[in-house]
Image (cartoon, rainbow, N blue to C red):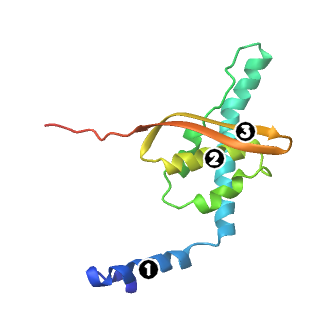
Amino acid sequence: QLEALRGEPYSKVSLEARQLLMRTMAPPVEERQQALLRQLNEAVTQWERTYVSHADEASSTGGGEEVGYRSFGEFLAPLVHSVNSIFEELAVFMWPKHRLSLRLASVELFIRRSYRQYDISGLRIFEESSQPDREVMCAEWWLRRRTRGITVA
């Protein structure tokens, strides 16, 4: 009932009550991580079916497929547009103990969630090793500010 209080004198109490309610109703972090891992694995599997199998076919037939970063964009869209906060859980999947495609998808999802108000016109994520057993994930992205269309009647 505290979160239902309205007006200037109650705004701080109402906000804190709403935040407390959200924290107590949220599932444990491990459960949220498992749910996010399932969604990420599904996106990665769809991405691999689309791009990895085509690259294998092209290389076996001698076709010259461009080598480089292929975005997970369309496969991550449900997670990008989700209303749930995922940043706390997402960082776990960027660690080297996870397979490369899952780490790449996690970094891309982090960037796309962070910059939702922009159109990402270019994105490149890669792993760099300056020393043996010391991989570093790197990313470059180019943004375009979204403009709202003005309709004149």
Horizontal and vertical percent for residue 34? 69, 61
SS for tag 2? helix
Disc number lying in front (1 or 3): 3
**Label placed on residue 25:** none
Residue to which mark 3 is pinned: 127
Q: Residue furthest right?
A: 132
Q: Residue at x 27, y 38 (%)?
A: 149
Q: Residue furthest top?
A: 62
SS for tag 3? strand
Residue to which mark 1 is pinned: 16
Horizontal and vertical percent for residue 55? 72, 24
Horizontal and vertical percent for residue 135? 78, 43
**Whether label 2 touches label 3, CB < 8 Å:** no
In three-dimensional space, the C-alpha distance between marks 2 and 3, rounded to whole angstroms, equals 11 Å
137 and 92: which one is in front? 137
On the picture, is 114 further left or further right than 62?
left
Q: Look at the image and tell me whether residue 86 can be seen.
A: yes
Asked where in the image residue 23 lies, by quadrant, the reply is: bottom right
Reading the chain from its start, which is encountered first: label 2 or label 3?
2
Q: Residue furthest bottom?
A: 1
Disc number lying in front (2 or 3): 3
**Label placed on residue 107:** 2
57 and 103: which one is in front? 103
* Vertical relation: 109 (above or below) 17: above
Quarter of the rendering occupied by the C terminus? top left
Kind of residue indicated by mark 2? Val
- The local crowd at label 2, few if under 14, some if 14 to 19, many if 20 or more residues have their Cα within 10 Å, is many
In three-dimensional space, the C-alpha distance between marks 1 and 2, rounded to whole angstroms, equals 31 Å
Horizontal and vertical percent for residue 2? 39, 86
Q: Residue at x 67, y 47 (%)?
A: 42
Kind of residue indicated by mark 1? Glu
